[in-house]
Amino acid sequence: MRIGRTLPPAAAPISLLNLLSGGKAAFMGEKAVELFREDLKDYFGVDHCFLVSSGKAALVLILEALKVIHPERGEVLVPALNCFSVPSAITRSGLKVVLCDIDRDSLDFDYDQLVAKLENPRLLCVIPTHLFGRPADISRLRSMIDDPDVTIIEDAAQAFGGEVAGEKSGTLGDVSLFSLGRGKALSTVEGGIVMTNRVDLATQIEEIYRKLPGYSLLQRLKLGIYALAMACLLHPLLYWLPNSLTFLKLGQTIYDPSFSLQRLSPLQAGFARGWQRKIENFKAIRKSHVEYWSIFLDGIKQVHYGRAFGEWSGLIRFPWMVESSTQRLRLLQESKRLGLGVAGTYPASIARIPSLKRNFQTESFPVAEECARFLVTLPVHPFVRSRDKARIKQSILRLCDGSEVGI
């Protein structure tokens, strides 16, 4: 077990001021939630915004509303490499997961394969994902969809504060969702956001949203304790402690459709205090780190994903495609030993989830599987210091011998 400075793979720091603001908001009640909601609507320029307990809860809210609008449709198309929370939400909503492979150069949909996938009269919606905060090409997707009853759900869970050609992530689809969980671009410990300008969809979402329970007093107390622990233990000087406790399952991607749906609490709305300033600050820091890793990996001729549409991306984790499973294993072991914050991504494609794989026995998703085997991520969050980058760089150069990286 490592004891000492340990970088988390991703982090959105919560300050003491955020904790105090959360306590104050708890006494304000629903007014605090409404203020947060109105700020979000103004910032993103949207008409309708709903605040819930998690990003996957936000997705369920959207899917349940779409089921009411289009009860004859029941299939949801997603990239084969994705957070397992996405298929968890789809399954929880009683819908069928449909997969499309991804493109190795962009980590977005394989648009050649997508053409046939869109020719499906049972298709309810398509969910493009800004993976690690790297923007999906939603304008291209929209140009390919001829069926007006197919909804684009923009999965911006990892892209709060991101932009694509001057447009804010979360405003590009018919409806969008964000996650406010630990390790995202902005965190309220846990939470989710739904945004849309579609009146028909917003009306149905509102019907479901009004029936959702709030957090109980005990749940809010636990949330406050967890927030305090997170504010302290997420710091690299202390992160070694929770990172060593395997039962916390930090960094694990879990498929579990049995999660709860609740309205966001005033406490969480308070944790978001100063969020506009915070996301701009965090984004500037992350872009600086992204540029650093891009230049370094370019220098040793490695495949990485630091640029999208010709711009530096405000990634929450920097994805890099290593060249061998041995190299990846050695790097992850070195990271664990030295607390470098280098991490794997998803353990497999969605097609390999045990309870879902029978649905994909006649299909293959080779690029998604390749990325699951060979992608690693480098940390870019505000806790990363110059000395941390130097240590990571040294480890990469030491572990990547000439036969593996061509140097």
Image: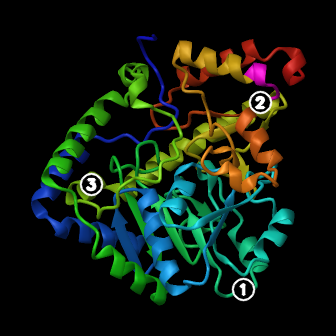
The tag on residue 268 is 3
In reply to whether residue 325 is colored magenta, the answer given is yes
Question: Given contact means CB atoms under 8 Å apart, are the residues at marks 1 and 3 in contact?
Answer: no
| Residue 177: percent from left, percent from top | 49, 65
Q: Is residue 298 above or below residue 96?
A: above
Q: How many marks?
A: 3
SS under mark 1: loop
Cα distance between the residues tagged 3 and 2: 38 Å
The residue shown at (49%, 57%) is 160
Decide: few, some or many residues near mark 3? Use Cα within 10 Å; few <14, some 14-19, many ≥20.
Answer: many
Query: Which of the marked residues, 3 or 2, is nearer the chain's N terminus?
Result: 3
The type of residue carrying mark 3 is: Gln
Front in this rendered view, residue 93 or 101? 93
The residue shown at (38%, 49%) is 187
In reply to whether residue 33 is colored magenta, the answer given is no
Residue 211 lies in quadrant: bottom left
| Residue 82: percent from left, percent from top | 63, 50
The type of residue carrying mark 2 is: Val
